[in-house]
Amino acid sequence: MQGARRISRRRTAVEAVLRYPRALLVVVLFLITVLSWAWIVLMARDMHGSMLGPAAWMMTPVWDGPHLLLLWAMWAVMMAGMMLPSASPVLLLYAGAVRNRADEPRAMLHVYALATGYLTVWAAFSVGAMVIQRMFGSLRLLTPMMEPATPVAGAAVLLVAGIYQMTPLKRVCLRTCRSPLSFLTRRWRSGRAGAFRMGVEHGIYCLGCCWALMLLLFAGGVMNLFVIAALTAWVTVEKIAPFGEQGARASGALLIATAAWMLAR
């Protein structure tokens, strides 16, 4: 009897949580973001400290499989912490669209499929970022502290990012990211697999919008907390603020000017 009562209480608790699926989604997004940032902060502080804690694995002369996997995980966690806040509008809008379905508890799982598809794209980007970091490291363009070894290397990254900020491809991708309702209307697919595919498609647009900005981590320091926070804030501004499109072009001009100043010096 007591076992049956416990199971009944658990079912009641789960049903109570599922009555508020959007609130649960907000909590999950918040927790993922907070946990990602907690790991980023611990890594960054240890890198500029004793390097005996979470960042100790970076002090390796040989980048074998396990160390490369840790480097990828560092980038993947960082991308989740930086990009999920700006993806919240499309996730919450999609949650609102499916919450009134008859099979609501199962339908709400589609939202997490959408989020998984989105994060899958950034996990793939993290593979590329890992390769670039190891290539820059082997060419001595990055220091062991993951900062640009010369002003020229930093200026080159700023120049690439600045030019891309002003391209038509950036503008198209940014407009899609700024219009979650339009994206869901045009790209709607049914089922969990359809939601995952929508998440991948939205992630690809987001990647097209922000990949060059993410490369600025190589110019300011991959684990520089100020740079990470500033990029997170700016990505969110571009996607949500009324002046986002104009701000993207203005930031491009500023990046190009900063690169020219660094090269002139």
Image: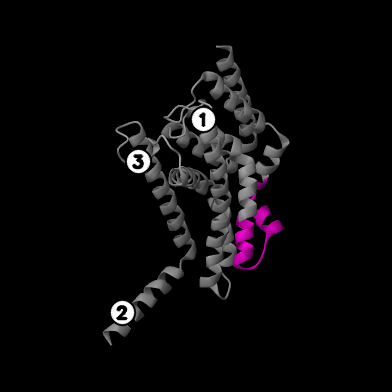
Residue carrying label 2: 6
Question: Can residue 92 be seen at all in this image of the molecule?
Answer: no
Label drawn at residue 42: 3
Look at the magenta stretch and give its main secondary structure: helix
Q: Which residue in the structure is indicated by mark 1?
A: 138
Instruction: Name which residue lies at 60% across and 56% down.
Output: 199
Query: Label 1 sits on what residue type?
Result: Ser
Looking at the image, the residue that sits furthest to the left is 2
Q: Residue pushed farthest top? A: 265
State whether residue 255 is above or below residue 46: above
Q: Secondary structure at mark 1?
A: helix
Q: CA distance from mark 3 to mark 2?
A: 39 Å
* Left or right of residue 72: residue 4: left
Q: Position of residue 257 (x, y in %)?
A: 60, 20
Q: CA distance from mark 1 to mark 3?
A: 26 Å
Q: Which residues are magenta?
A: 176-199
Compared with 222, 152 (above or below) is: above
Label 3: element kind: helix
Q: Specify the quadrant of the image occupied by residue 212.
A: top right
